[in-house]
Amino acid sequence: MSTLKVQNIQHTNGTSGMAISSGGVITQPAIPCCFVQLTTSNAQDTSNPYTTTSTDIRFDQIITNQGNCYSESTGRFTVPVAGIYEVINTFLTNNNTSSDHSTFLRKNDVLIHRSFNSTSNEHVQLVTHCLVDCNVGDYFTVQLSSGNIYINSDGSYSSFTVRLVG
């Protein structure tokens, strides 16, 4: 058995890829990822509920955008490194509606996962969560396909998360 004793692993250009603390905690500061939210200040539909269907949702509150992979102007997360990506989107449906609620998660404009809830007079959370094999340049978007979603000024009810997992 051998032991490799290092604190940092870097590319030859000096970019840090991994660090190990004295307590054994490993950090990877360059993993492509985003966590974005939809607020009533978005550029598409500032009404509450949000009702714009069949259009890529442009999440406007960017909490994390490591690698600048998410574009607020297009609503796309563009894959910079080939691999497996975890993709999650969460919405709260509006409780005053007479239509079904449905969202689409799309990769390169092709439906890969959807969430659905039939007509309800209650707020219901719609969630998609999947792992997707990607090539460089692939992209993810989310669309409201029917119904409407509840949004607020702080974005705490609607989010989109993407991250490289391996």
Image (tube, helix red, strand yellow):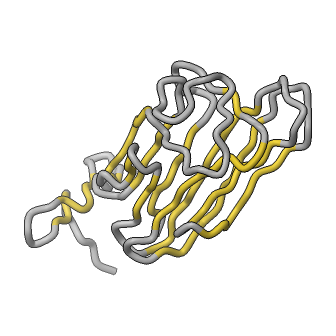
Residue at the spot x=77%, y=48% of the render?
102
Residue 106 sits in quarter: bottom right
What percent of the width, then of the height, locates residue 37? 51, 35
User: In the displayed structure, would residue 114 be above or below residue 60?
Assistant: below
Q: Farthest bottom residue?
A: 1
Residue at the spot x=49%, y=42% of the render?
58
User: In the displayed structure, would residue 115 be above or below residue 1?
Assistant: above
Q: Farthest left residue?
A: 13
Residue at the spot x=78%, y=39% of the render?
147
**Going by the image, does 64 lie left or right of 158?**
left
Between 104 and 166, the residue placed more toward the observer is: 104
Between 108 and 158, the residue placed more toward the observer is: 108
Residue 9 sits in quarter: bottom left
**The N terminus appears in which quarter of the rendering?**
bottom left
Between 144 and 38, the residue placed more toward the observer is: 144
Between 27 and 142, the residue placed more toward the observer is: 142
Residue 81 sits in quarter: bottom left
Q: How many marks?
A: 0
Q: Farthest top residue?
A: 153
Residue at the spot x=76%, y=33% of the render?
93
What percent of the width, then of the height, locates residue 61? 43, 32
What percent of the width, then of the height, locates residue 79? 40, 66
User: In the displayed structure, would residue 69 be above or below residue 81?
Assistant: above
**Going by the image, does 136 lie left or right of 88?**
left
**Going by the image, does 119 lie left or right of 162?**
right
**Going by the image, does 49 lie left or right of 69?**
right
